[in-house]
Image (tube, coloured by chain):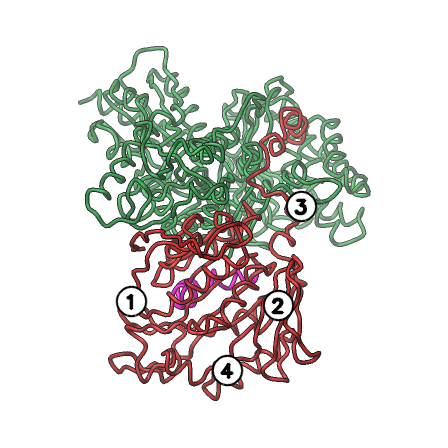
Chain colours: A red, B green
Amino acid sequence: MTYIVKPKIVHSGLQRNALGLTIRDYEGSMSTLCAGCGHDSITAAIVQAFFELHVPPHRVAKMSGIGCSSKTPAYFLSSAHGFNAVHGRMPSIATGASAANRSLYLLGISGDGDSLSIGLGQFSHAVRRNLNMLYIIENNGVYGLTKGQFSASADVGSKAKRGEMNKQQPIDPVQMAMAQGGTFVARSFSGDKDQLVPLLKAGIKHDGFGLIDIVSPCVTFNDHEDSTKSYAYTRQFYHPAVHADFVPPAEEIKASYNRGDVMPVELHDGSRILLRKVSKDYSVHNRGAAIDYIRAHQRKGEIVTGLLYIDQGEPDMHGINRTASLPLNELPFDTLCPGTESLVSLQDLYR
Amino acid sequence: MSAKTKNRVNDFTIKLANVNGTGSASANSLLMKTIFRMGVPVTGKNFFPSNIQGLPTWYEIRVSKDGYLARSGDVDVMVAMNAETYEEDLGEVSKGGTLIYDSTWPRDKTLSRRSVTVLGIPLAKMCNEHFDNVRARILMKNMAYVGALAALLDLDLDVIHTLVKEIFAAKESLIGANLKAIELGFEYAGENFQCPLPTRVKALDKTSGHIMIDGNTAAGLGCVYSGATVGAWYPITPSTSLMDAFKAFCERFRKDPETGERNYCVVQAEDELAAIGIVLGATWNGARAFTPTSGPGLSLMSEFLGFAYYAELPAVVFDVQRVGPSTGMPTRTQQGDILAAAYASHGDTRHVVLFPSNPQECFELSLAAFDLADRLQTPVLILSDLDIGMNDWMCEELKWDPKYKPDRGKVFDAETLKGGAEKFSRYLDRDGDGVAYRSYPGVNGDGAYFVRGSGHNQYGGYTEDAAEYQQVIDRLMLKWGTAKKLVPDPYIRRTRKASQYAIVSVGSCDNAVQEAIDRLSSKGIYLNYLRVKAFPFGKKVTNFLRKHERVFVVEQNRDAQLKSLLCLETDYSKQRMQSILHYSGLPIDSSCIVAAIEQAVSQGEAA
C-alpha cells in the first residue's frame, strides 16, 4: 500500500478526548488514493469515531486484504498495528487475532472485490462465526487497482466506463450477512458522515460481528452517468430506514425521543444506539422483515441505509468456545504445559 | 515342518482381513497390545479404504524379537474374515503359513493351497448361538478370533483379560460378553487344533520403557506441551486425528474444572486457506499456533506460506503426507510433499522443514518446531506421513524436561518499547544473524507497524525501491544461514567397518532402512546411514555426504524428491547418488532396499 508521510501538526486549540488525545493522534499517513475517492471520506469517519470513543489507538488491530479499500488502514490510526493480508483472506487473519487476543478492537477494511469475489467464503464464515470485529466493505462496484473491471456487487444494467453493460446479478453483502446469522448489519454512504460516524461507533462497540457496507463511489472508474454506484445515483436513490445515534455509557441521553418513534438499543458495555425510524414499519430486530424491506426498495432502485439489523443475544466465537476471559497470548507457559507427572501418568494409556 | 516355519517364535506377521465398519479395529488393537504387554516388540499397520462401511480393510501385525518394526513383506498367519477378498488373502500367505477363516460358511475346496494350513472356525455360528442382538453377533466374531489366536499363538490370557477390562472400563456391561467371545474362540481352537502353532509368541522383556502410540496423537500432545493455544484446521485424512488429539488433551489439561473455561481455542476453518490465515493472525499476536493438514491442504496454503516467509511470521504446519498427486489415495502413505513443502509458494521462497521418523519424534519435533518458528520468525513445516500418523508404533516413552522454557525469539516487549531507549524497526538486523525484532499488537503504539506481503524496507515501510527491496530479501538468506545452525542434527548410524557406501533417508523409511542395513551386513555389505531430520541441511549432512563414494537415497515417492533437494542444496555430486524408491502407497519394507543395494554393489564390483 502506497502512502506519503503526513506531518503531524497539533494546534493548541484542538479538542482533546478523555485520553487527552487530539484527532491528529487517530490519523495515519497521507492517502494516495484518487482525489475525491469515497474511501477517504470513510477514513475520516473512522478517525472521528475512534477519537470520539476515546479508544487508545494502539488497542486497535486494523486489517485488510488487497485492493484500493485495503490500502486505507495506512491512512488512519498510525499507532495501531496493521495487517495487510493476501487478497480476500483478511477474515481468517482477524479470526486468528481474535483467538489469540480477545481484548483488542478488531477492525477489518475490505472492498467488494476482496469480500464478494475472491474472499466470499472467508467473509461468510467470519459472519457465521460471529467473530467479534467491525468489518467494513468499501463498496464501489468496480476493480480500481486493475483499472475498471466490474465487481460482484455491480448492479444489473450498470455500465462500465467504456460502455460495457453488466448483466450478472449483484451480490449484496447486507442481505448475505443477514441470511448467514450476522448480528449487526448496516449500510451507509461514504458521503454521509452524519450517518456513518454513529454507525461506526455502534459497530465498534457491538459484541460480535458487525458489518457496515458503505457505498463509496470510485471517481475514476465508476462515477459516470450509467453507474449505480456513482455519487449522483447514490444521492438520488439514498433511502435511510433508520437514523442512528450513538451514546457512550457515561453520557447522559440528551436526545429526546418519543416512544414508538425512537428506539434505544443498549450494548453490552452500557452504551446505547438511538434509532430513529424514518419508516414506521421498519424493525431492526426482525431479520426476515428487514430483508423484505431492503429487497422491496431494491426493486425500485433504492438503497436502504442505516442500522438494518441488530441482535445482541448471540454469543461470539469465544462465547461459543468458552475461551478463557484472559487473552490466550497472555497465559503463562506454566499454566499451559501439563508438566512431567501428567506426561508419565498419561502414558499408561499407551501400554 | 518346512524350513520356513522353523524358529518362528516371536518372529512372524499376522494379517487380518476384515470388512470396514464391523468393529474389527478394537479386536486387532487388543491383539497387538497383548503381544506388546508380553514384552515382545510389535507393530501394527492399518490398510483401510477411503470409506466408512462395507469395504475391505486389512490390519498387519508384525511380531519381531529383534525389534524390527517395518513391514516384513510376509504373511505367516492370515485371519480371513472377508469373503470378498478371501482368494486374494489366501494367495498372500507365505509358504508354510496358516490361514484362519469363518467356517460357518465352508469354502470351496478349490479355494485352498497345499502350502498353507487352513483352519476353519465357525465364528458366526458360535456367536449367533451365544449372543442375542445382531450388533453383538457381528462385533463378537472379532473377539472370538482373538480368542482362537490366543490359543494358536500361545498368548497370555491374563493379559488379554486385563486389557479387555481396561478397554471397556467405561462400558462395564460389555466386559462379560467380550470375555465370553474370547473364551468361545479359545476353546474351539484348543479342542480342534494342535495348539500352539510353531509360529507363536513367547514372553520377553523387550518392551519396557516403551509405549504404543500413533504419531498424530504424539504430535497433538507435543502441541499442548509446547504451549500452543490456537489451532486451526480443515478436516483432511490423514491429519484429522492430530487435532482430535490436541482437543482431547486440552479438555483434560487446559479446561478449568469449575468454570469450564478453556485455555485454548480451536477453530474448524472453512478451508485450508483460512486455517493457515488463522494461524498467522494468532502468531502475529504472539500466541503459538498450528495447523494440521495433508498434501491438498498444503497446496491451498501455499500463498499464505509465502506471505509468512516474507512478512516473517511464525507458523507451525503439520503435513501428514498421503498419496498424491491430487486427491490421490487419501488412506495410503507416501513422502511426496518434500519439494512442495521446502519451496511452497511463488517467488524466492524457502521453508524450514522437519522430518519425524516415528511418534516419539513427532512429539519432540513439535516442540522444536514451535521454538524454531518463534526464533526464526518463519513457518516451520513438519512432514509426517500416514504411516507414522495413523498407525500405532512402538517407541520409547516420551520424556519431559521440566527445565524446558519455550524460546519465543526476539520480541520488543512493553518494557523495551515504553523505555523508548530503542527505536523499533520491524525488519532491521540488529544482531547480524538475519533475525529482526518483532512486537505484538496492543502492547504499545511505538511498536506499531504493518505486516504486509508487499515490498517493504528494513524499517517495515512499504517500498518499491530496488535497493531497499533487495536488502530485505538478502537478509532473509542470511537468516536461512542461521536456520542451518539451529535445526536438529541428522540421525547418523555408522557401521563398524569402514565403508564407502551410505544410505541417506528420511522419515518413516527408518525402520526398513535399519533392518536392511542389518540384513546387508550379514551378507558382507556394510553401510553408514544418515537420516535427515531437517531442511535446510546443516554441516553434518554435507560432511557426511562428502565422506562417501556412493550414496543410496531411500525415500517413498516416485520423483526422488529428497535426492533432488540434496542435489539443489548441497555440493554433492548427483552422479554419486542412487535412488531407491518405493511409492505404492503401502509402507516401505526392507526387502526392496536390500535387493537394490545388493544389485548395485555387485554391479559396481563387476565393473
Distance between the Cα atoms at labels 4 and 2? 20 Å
Q: Tell me the kind of residue under disc 4.
A: His
Corner quadrant of residue A231? bottom left
Q: Which residues are magenta?
A: A110-128
Q: Tell me the kind of residue under disc 3.
A: Ser
**Which one is earlier in the sequence, the residue at label 2 or at label 1?**
1
**Which one is earlier in the sequence, the residue at label 4 or at label 2?**
4
B442 drawn magenta:
no
Using a 10 Å C-alpha cutoff, classify the residue at mark 4 as few (fewer than 14 neighbours), some (14 to 19) or many (20 or more): some
CB-based contact (under 8 Å), mark 2 and mark 1: no
| Residue occupying image coordinates x 52% and y 83% | A295
Distance between the Cα atoms at labels 4 and 3? 80 Å
User: How many tags in the picture?
Assistant: 4
CB-based contact (under 8 Å), mark 1 and mark 3: no
Left or right placement of residue B588 versus residue B107 in this view: left
- The residue that disc 3 covers is B103
Numbered label attached to residue A273 = 2
CB-based contact (under 8 Å), mark 2 and mark 3: no
Identify the secondary structure beneath mark 2.
strand
Chain letter belonging to callout 1: A
- The residue that disc 1 covers is A34
Counting from the top left corner in percent of width and height, residue B174 is at: 79, 43
Q: Are marks 4 and 3 on the same chain?
A: no
| Residue occupying image coordinates x 76% and y 45% | B126
